[in-house]
């Protein structure tokens, strides 16, 4: 039986399964590592095809390269597949080169960077030991690649959204901007191969499973990769199919907390209503909790109330900016008033919420960023993250930065906390980072915030300890 190793490499923590953001977890203020669902989906597909599959998240396990080499020597995989990020691509390729030259497996790398890539970008990379690149949805690609590479079956040119190496060493693209339709037909991630205890709810340390409820986003945000990679037409799983996966997690793996992964969970109020009512009327109600991302528009107080009743313990909003001018320029499709209204509804119904904010957009000056700070204080989320605008290849933001000579270096190797930009049209990157530090410290070190969180934790000492850990991490990251 052919052997396949699916892995995240040793190194710093990154959300390698998140094509949209690929967040640097180590340098964030309060991020927790999410489950390696991309590897889990790939494993499920390959297991159905009777491959012998090993899955390992070396980075989250805290394993070294020695452990990876030991697994290569003992498992002897015929094919290896690694998830990469834009930030880590250079170090990731060094690992691929090392493994290829020593063990000679078929090599596959997967990441948003390879979605219909520009030849000029590929020329920056050392791809001599790479055989296949997956730029799209892994579960619609990995089975075809494995069958073709290991069993000499199928037509590799029909596999969606990949690049494969021809006999002359050049890479050939297959069809991009085409997506698999029925998500209900895909198997659930192979969680029996995953160390589910690694992926924790930040406050309680309970295992938290990631469940992808939909793919695609109709929005036009200039900084986001999703509409290109997953399409602008949202493909939903049926609520029953989602509930079936939750039930499997609960009964088979003892998981009671879930992150509903969707580019925007609340984009279709009718679907959310059906999903929540299904949970409420199921045996899981009162036994499980979940969190989800949301846009502030479209949104209603009734939707948030129903989510809370179904078990939502936290909702995360991409507020982005406190300036209507900037929100319009980034094509967010929402206003500051919409942001404030979403926050007000959460406060009224007692639903905790997380606010995501971005500063350092090309058009921003100090006034715009201070308006974002004002919104943060007014909205008063339970937690926030403030990142620096990152111009991914393939986004309108990248083109704007390029046209205005704002790129200090290649966007490869940079992340939300170590930007490749020189700054904005009005501020240096040093000034932007100082403003970020000021916002985060001003928010998290308020006596009212600290005492409020302490009050919440009177009966939950373990939660209080976790809050302290994240607080120390935040301060260390801001001053290191």
Image: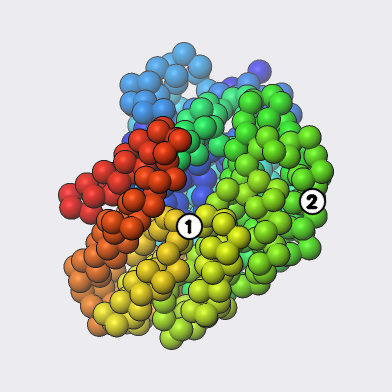
Secondary structure under the numbered disc 2 in the rendered image: helix
Residue at x-position 24% and y-position 65%? 438
Vertically, is 334 above or below 354?
below
Mark 1 crowd level (few <14, some 14–19, many ≥20, 10 Å Cα): many
Mark 2 crowd level (few <14, some 14–19, many ≥20, 10 Å Cα): some
> Which numbered disc covers residue 277?
2
Residue beneath label 1, please? 354
**Residue 78 visible within the image:** no
Q: Quadrant of residue 420?
A: bottom left
Residue at x-position 66% and y-position 46%? 311
Pick the front one: 280 or 25: 280
Residue at x-position 76% and y-position 44%? 279
Vertically, is 320 above or below 256?
below
Residue at x-position 50% and y-position 18%? 76
Display coloring: rainbow
Pick the front one: 150 or 218: 218
Residue 167, image x, y percentages? 54, 44
> Which numbered disc covers residue 430?
none
Vertically, is 341 above or below 268?
below
Pick the front one: 212 or 366: 366
Task: Quote the CA–CA distance across marks 1 and 2.
Answer: 24 Å
């Amino acid at each position: 039986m052919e052997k396949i190793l699916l892995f995240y490499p040793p190194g710093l923590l990154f959300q390698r399964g998140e094509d949209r953001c690929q967040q640097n977890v180590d340098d964030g203020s309060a991020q927790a590592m999410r489950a390696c669902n991309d590897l889990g989906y790939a494993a499920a597909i390959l297991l159905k095809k009777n491959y012998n599959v090993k899955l390992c998240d070396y980075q989250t396990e805290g394993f070294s390269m020695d452990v990876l080499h030991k697994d290569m020597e003992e498992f002897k995989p015929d094919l290896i597949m690694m998830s990469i990020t834009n930030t880590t691509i250079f170090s990731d390729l060094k690992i691929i080169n090392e493994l290829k030259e020593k063990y000679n497996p078929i090599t596959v790398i997967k990441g948003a960077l390879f979605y219909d890539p520009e030849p000029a970008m590929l020329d920056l990379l050392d791809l001599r030991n790479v055989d296949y690149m997956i730029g799209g949805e892994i579960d619609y690609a990995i089975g075809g690649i494995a069958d073709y590479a290991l069993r000499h079956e199928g037509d590799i040119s029909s596999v969606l959204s990949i690049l494969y190496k021809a006999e002359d060493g050049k890479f050939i693209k297959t069809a991009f901007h085409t997506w698999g339709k029925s998500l209900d037909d895909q198997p659930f991630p192979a969680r029996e191969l995953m160390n589910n205890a690694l992926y924790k709810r930040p406050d309680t340390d309970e295992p938290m499973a990631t469940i992808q409820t939909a793919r695609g986003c109709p929005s036009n945000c200039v900084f986001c990769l999703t509409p290109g990679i997953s399409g602008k037409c949202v493909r939903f799983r049926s609520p029953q199919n989602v509930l079936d996966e939750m039930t499997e997690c609960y009964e088979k793996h003892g998981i009671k907390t879930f992150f509903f992964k969707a580019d925007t969970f609340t984009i279709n109020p009718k679907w959310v209503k059906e999903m929540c009512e299904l949970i409420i009327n199921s045996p899981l109600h009162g036994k499980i909790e979940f969190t989800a991302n949301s846009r502030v528009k479209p949104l209603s107080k009734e939707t948030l109330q129903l989510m809370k009743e179904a078990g939502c313990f936290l909702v995360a909003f991409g507020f982005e900016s406190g300036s209507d001018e900037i929100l319009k320029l980034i094509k967010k499709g929402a206003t500051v008033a919409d942001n404030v209204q979403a926050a007000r509804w959460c406060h009224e119904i007692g639903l905790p919420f997380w606010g995501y904010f971005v500063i350092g957009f090309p058009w921003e000056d100090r006034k715009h960023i201070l308006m974002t700070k004002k919104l943060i204080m007014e909205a008063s989320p339970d937690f926030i993250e403030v990142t620096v605008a990152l111009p991914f290849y393939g986004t309108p933001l990248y083109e704007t930065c390029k046209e205005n000579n704002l790129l200090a270096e290649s966007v490869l190797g940079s992340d939300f906390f170590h930007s490749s930009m020189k700054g904005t049209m009005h501020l240096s990157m040093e000034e932007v980072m100082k403003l970020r530090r000021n916002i985060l410290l001003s928010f998290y070190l308020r006596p009212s915030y600290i005492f409020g969180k302490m009050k919440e934790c009177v009966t939950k000492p373990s939660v209080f300890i976790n809050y302290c850990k994240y607080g120390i991490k935040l301060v260390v990251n801001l001053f290191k």
